[in-house]
Amino acid sequence: MRVQKDMKISLIGSLVLTAVSCGFASASEIEEQSALKQLSAYFAKANMVANPSIVDCTLSGGNKTKCFQITVKPEPMTHTPGPWCPENISSSADSGGIWLEEGKVYDVNGAFIENLSTFYSDEKWRLFDSETGAVRITDTYEKCAGAAKPNVEPEYQQHCVECQPSFVEQSKTITYTIPLFPTEADQPSNTRESGSGIAFDGVRLDASAPVSDILSNYTLAPFDDCGGHVNLAVGYHYHAATDCLQKAATSFDHGEAVGLAMDGHLILARQLSDGSTPTDLDQCGGHQTEQLPYHYHAGEQGSNAILGCLVAEYGCVSTEPGAECDSSKSSKKGSRRGPPDFATAAKRLGVREDELKKALGTPPPDFKEAASRLGITVELLQQALGN
Ligand SMILES: [Zn+2]
Ligand SMILES: [Zn+2]
């Protein structure tokens, strides 16, 4: 099921690799430039801050290689994010977004909010005012910061959680550094470590939403109809691959591409060109076919998992434009030097300092657990802490 170690071939590579020898550039440079051109074309509609480039990078497994680097604003140019929470329990479906539960997609309309206690068989659910039917929504920056994370204080519980794109720092950019050619990892990694990838509209394809944490606080953080919502750390991001995704035609008769995984493999739409869905996908959601090297197919919309895991070594996500990428640092434990600067880290992540400390718990910190509590990836957390 897997590609061979160090096999310098990917869907991108195989599409663009042509035997050119002009005497000025090596074959691998030509291959890299062709891959850059192909990828740049895929991301043509992304909200780019600068043109994509090729940079040196160190992947999660320590492999030093060449990466594709793209810096984007975390807002799509192809649609306006939202809405998420309906205003009243009488509101119709177009005033709210969707919720994903056990493989199904539910419209978050007023009735859905009203019936949450039945839906979750827990009478404590009550996100609305009994007299007016008004849904309690996190409609200010403070409320969004207080509720859009686990360990929600009582005052922010029982809210429909939404963060407006305007709450995110206007200067925020996200830099993705992704291997041009994948290197198979010793073992698959959890998408919580790096996220799943980036959609061709430049929006982050995130790991699964921490649904049990969200629900245990009697909060509901719906996605808009495109499967996206906003958090203060990374801005607008997707938890589902919906029809909103920009599709790129590929030259092979298998399906359309929708994004690039953090390990450099292409992500194709769930459905193949003939309308069927592949039946031989591995635990990460990928496979290779007789004609094609390894690639992923995005998970079902309702699954809350765009990818199950990553088979190859992943690159980096950073909120520092043009950041150098060494993701082997964040995947190693205990590499930190000196005490962390919690205030700066909290600011970078868009959370309060006390919340960051609370998430980290007593030393030594469990970064995976803390990142999950904050609803971000381990990599972003460690980066914010200066690891
Ligand atoms: Zn999210
Ligand atoms: Zn396939």
Image: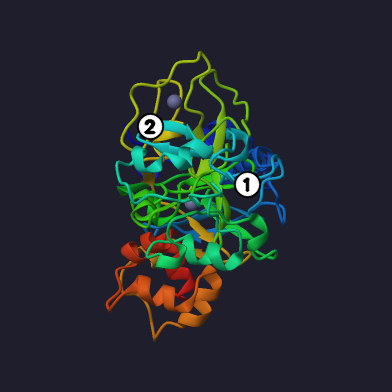
Q: Which residue is mark 2?
A: 103
User: Which x, y percent locates residue 142?
Assistant: 57, 68
Callout 2–callout 1 Cβ contact below 8 Å = no
Q: Give me the residue at 54% from left, 62% from top.
A: 144
CA gap, disc 2 and disc 1:
25 Å
- Seen in the picture, residue 39 relative to 159 is either above or below; the reply is above
Q: Position of residue 69 (x, y in %)?
A: 60, 54
- Quarter assignment of residue 34: top right
Mark 1: few/some/many CA within 10 Å (<14, 14-19, 20+)? many
Q: Earlier in the sequence, mark 2 or mark 1?
A: 2
Question: 10 Å neighbourhood of mark 2: few (<14), some, or many (≥20)?
Answer: few
Dividing the image into four equal quarters, which quarter contains ligand 2?
Answer: top left
Residue drawn at (47%, 37%), measured in percent from left and top? 112
Instruction: Single out the residue that lies furthest toward the front.
Output: 131
Task: Give the residue at mark 1.
Answer: 202
From what the image shows, is residue 137 above or below residue 340?
above
Nearer the camera: disc 2 or disc 1: 2
Outermost top residue:
274
Residue sitting at x 33%, y 24%: 280
